[in-house]
Image (cartoon, rainbow, N blue to C red):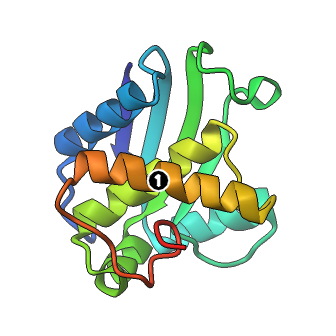
Amino acid sequence: MPIFINNEQREHSIDCVLLENQGESILLFLECENQELSVLLADDRKIRTLNKQYRGQDQATDVLSFSQNEEEENKPNSPLMGDIVISTETAKRQAAEHGLTLEEEIVLLLIHGILHLLGFDHERSDEESCHMKQKTRELFDWIFPNKKPEESCNLYSD
């Protein structure tokens, strides 16, 4: 279950080995241990460019997911899962709002991105949103058993 992390941002010190291990734990929990995942840690400028290019939204965001298996969504046996881009600048701001460390917020965003790659979509319906939040809580609680984000965290709380 290779996870490739490319840290292009220079603003924040990130333990990429720890993040890789946490990502592997998430994939193992989701029974996706045979898939490859690429993670890009970027700044707001880079993620804004990607968000505009691929989603038509000219603004920075916290996380973007790019599936390598659009036609095979929800199939955990495909070797290439996809790419996730996380803005560490946005993550840092959100971490303060959510009562988390930067590391915890990045893992929360990584979980969110992976779930999108597996076909979860919180924008499709309230039911799917609830299901995605429940799965996010399961995974986050498994990685950080004694930590809960603040109620303001819409990725985690209902």
Which residue is found at the position 39% from the left and 79% from the top? 94
Is the residue 40 above or below the residue 32 in the image?
below
- Give residue 75's quadrant in the image: top right
Which residue is found at the position 67% from the left and 29% from the top? 68
* Residue under label 1: 136
Question: Which of the pair 70/16 is nearer the observer?
Answer: 70
Question: In the rendering, at what x and y percent does residue 97 appear?
Answer: 36, 86
Q: Is residue 73 left or right of residue 94?
A: right
Is residue 8 visible in this depiction of the protein?
A: no
Which residue is found at the position 17% from the left and 50% from the top? 15
Three-letter amino acid code at the position of disc 1: Thr
On the rendered image, what quadrant is the N terminus found in? Answer: top left
Is residue 143 visible in this depiction of the protein?
A: yes
Is the residue 97 above or below the residue 125 in the image?
below
Q: Is residue 18 left or right of residue 94?
A: left
Q: Is residue 17 left or right of residue 44?
A: left
Question: In the rendering, at what x and y percent does residue 22 appear?
Answer: 27, 40
Figure disc tally: 1
Question: In the rendering, at what x and y percent does residue 69 appear?
Answer: 72, 26
Q: Residues within 10 Å of mark 1 (few under 14, many from 20)?
A: many
Question: In the rendering, at what x and y percent does residue 11 appear?
Answer: 27, 71
- Give residue 43's quadrant in the image: bottom left
Question: Which of the pair 124/21 is nearer the observer?
Answer: 124
Which residue is found at the position 43% from the left and 76% from the top? 90
**SS label for mark 1:** helix
- Give residue 14's quadrant in the image: bottom left
On the rendered image, what quadrant is the C terminus found in? Answer: bottom right
Is the residue 99 above or below the residue 26 in the image?
below
Q: Is residue 116 left or right of residue 136?
A: right
